[in-house]
Amino acid sequence: MMLPRELVHDTIVLDNKPGAKIHYTFAAEKCLQSSPRGLIVFLNGLMTDKSTWLPVMASIIRKYGDDGYPSLFAYDRYGQGLTEDRDPQDQGREKGRGHDIGDVVRDLHQLITQIDKEKSESRSRWQLHVIFVANSIGCAIARLYAQWYPGFVEGLLLLDPMMANSKFDWWPDPDSGNFNPGELPEDVTIDVLREQRTKFATIFAPDVVNKEGLDRRNLADMLPHSNQPWLQGPGGHGPVITVVEHDPERFATESLQSMGTPISLSMKYTNPLWHRYNKGVAQITDPKG
């Protein structure tokens, strides 16, 4: 796909982490000088990179080119996508467990600070309003950023957030003392249940090492609740939060195809649990806006 010329691809080195380049894509704002400075930041999931956002950024530019749009920014975290350099602080630490979500959030704040200074000097007197568009674990990054840096985030568009407080242990444990096999769907045997629990734990559990070396083992401690704490945006009001869920039937079908998960397991346990989590996330802002 041909991308608009407004999208610029470049690298940047964080002032506090010299020697490691981060690849990013940026489009400068096109809006009236009297409007607030805005920056839409796209945050990747764990198994994707910034290339997934490029069609979205291109669509915004083409659709709103005449009326104006805020600055657009996407990047690949250390060890992800085009960013081949590893996080410098990973050196000397256990392989695959060098940095955690907190480190990613602090890096993101440093990154936004430098990009804003570099790209928006002519309007630096205006407060920057940040809008996050995030997917999967990127939603957890967005939440923590808004929590740790109150007053900066104007809005969060959270696409199928991962359950940050989950160990991906969604189904009944057949080895627990209160397990009742009679509550299982008719087409799910105990052997199938054990197989699915093992399969998901092997791939998705927080202690599983990933390509970018992001340690997720303490994520549930950082975000133990879906519905708290409340977030504070610019001007003291809560940011606008929109949560977009996956289609439950499509998810169940795709889980059957990719993981062999019986549709009944997804529909009885996984989807309702995820829906309750998402309802909580949608409540972490002032309902009055």
Image (tube, rainbow, N blue to C red):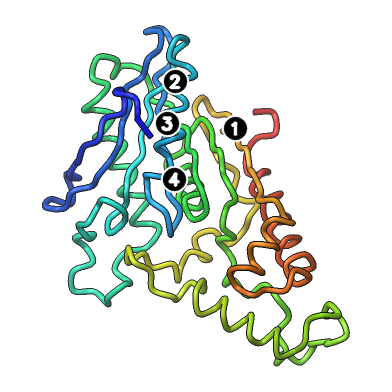
Measured in 3D between alpha carbons, the distance from the residue under mark 3 to the one under mark 4, in whole angstroms, is: 22 Å
Q: Eyeballing the image, is 5 above or below 231?
A: above
Q: Tell me residue 25's x, y (percent).
A: 30, 36
Earlier along the polypeptide chain: callout 1 or callout 4? 4
Residue at 70 percent across and 84 percent down: it is 193
Image vertical order of residue 11 relative to residue 92, above or below: above
Question: Helix, strand, or loop for circle 2?
Answer: helix
Amino acid at pointer 1: Val
Q: Which residue is mark 4?
A: 145
Q: Residues within 10 Å of mark 1 (few under 14, many from 20)?
A: many
Real-space Cα separation, disc 4 to disc 2, in angstroms: 29 Å
Q: Dots 1 and 2: beta carbons under 8 Å? A: no
Within 10 angstroms of label 3, few (less than 14), some, or many (20 or more) residues? many
Element at label 3:
helix
Q: Quadrant of the N terminus?
A: top left
Residue topped by disc 3: 57
Secondary structure, mark 4, is helix
Give yes or no for contact between labels 2 and 3 (Cβ–Cβ under 8 Å).
Answer: no
**Distance from Cα at disc 1 to Cα at disc 3:** 20 Å
**Quadrant of the rendered structure where residue 4 is?**
top left
Residue type of the residue flagged with mark 3: Met
Task: Identify residue for label 1.
Answer: 240
Gap between marks 1 and 4 measured at Cα = 15 Å
Q: Classify the position of the C terminus by image quarter.
A: top right
